[in-house]
Amino acid sequence: MSRRAMQRINALSEPDAIAAFFACCGCKKYAQSMASSRPFADAEAMKATSDKIWSECGREEILEAFLAHPKIGDKKGAAQHGGKWASNEQKGMNAASEQTAVAMAVGNQEYEAKMGFRYIVCATGKSAEEMLGILQNRIKNKPDEELMNGAAEQNKITHLRLNKLLADHEAGSL
């Protein structure tokens, strides 16, 4: 990414920066901390800061970020949650057979009932069957382990969205 994109992000007003970072990770503490950590020298510095802030978030902040995501396969929820990027991130579900879509919906319910929170996976580039297989493997875990797995997946999603934020500012589309 160019310096210009980073300069545009660094120049955002505090409320606009908070909103931009909240779109990357739906946790208020994260977004506020990222906005107040500017200016960033470059994309790597921004991502390193993001990693540090995310690693300092506790259970409540992690769960807040999870709730900002639509359930995998929930097209209606993708429009309501996750902003402009969520539908594209889960596009692997668009080609799901009815059987896979139903299995994902049931799996989401079972996972949430067992874990107490939403199933989070970095869906970008994954097929519906792959996302379902990951869910079926992870549902066997204990809730504390899954909180950490979900937090790691959230961090992957955040990195992808930070790249999208940079690309949007590169193009001057914001």
Image (tube, rainbow, N blue to C red):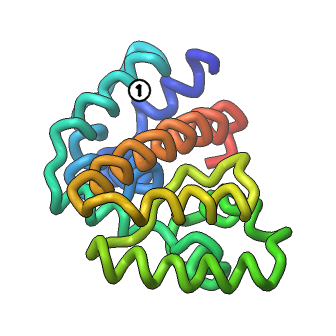
Q: Is residue 43 above or below residue 9?
A: above
Q: Is residue 46 left or right of residue 128?
A: left
Question: What residue is shown at x 80% (from left), y 84% (from top)?
Answer: 98
Residue 168 locus on image (x, y percent):
65, 41
Residue 53 locus on image (x, y percent):
23, 36
Question: What residue is shown at x 72% (from left), y 46% (from top)?
Answer: 125
Q: Quadrant of the N terminus?
A: top right
Q: Secondary structure at mark 1?
A: helix
Residue 141 locus on image (x, y percent):
34, 58
Depth check: give the residue in front, 136 or 112.
Answer: 136
Q: Is residue 32 above or below residue 87?
A: above
Determine if residue 110 is in view. yes
Q: Is residue 138 left or right of residue 74?
A: left
Q: Is residue 157 above or below residue 146?
A: above
Q: How many marks?
A: 1
Depth check: give the residue in front, 112 or 172.
Answer: 112
Question: What residue is shown at x 16% (from left), y 38% (from top)?
Answer: 56
**Which image quarter: residue 129?**
bottom right
Residue 159 locus on image (x, y percent):
49, 36
Q: Is residue 142 left or right of residue 7?
A: left
Depth check: give the residue in front, 105 or 12.
Answer: 105
Determine if residue 27 is in view. no
Question: What residue is shown at x 37% (from left), y 77% (from top)?
Answer: 112
Q: Which residue is mark 1?
A: 47
Give, as a three-letter code, the residue at label 1.
Lys
Q: Is residue 133 above or below residue 148?
A: below
Depth check: give the residue in front, 87 or 3.
Answer: 87
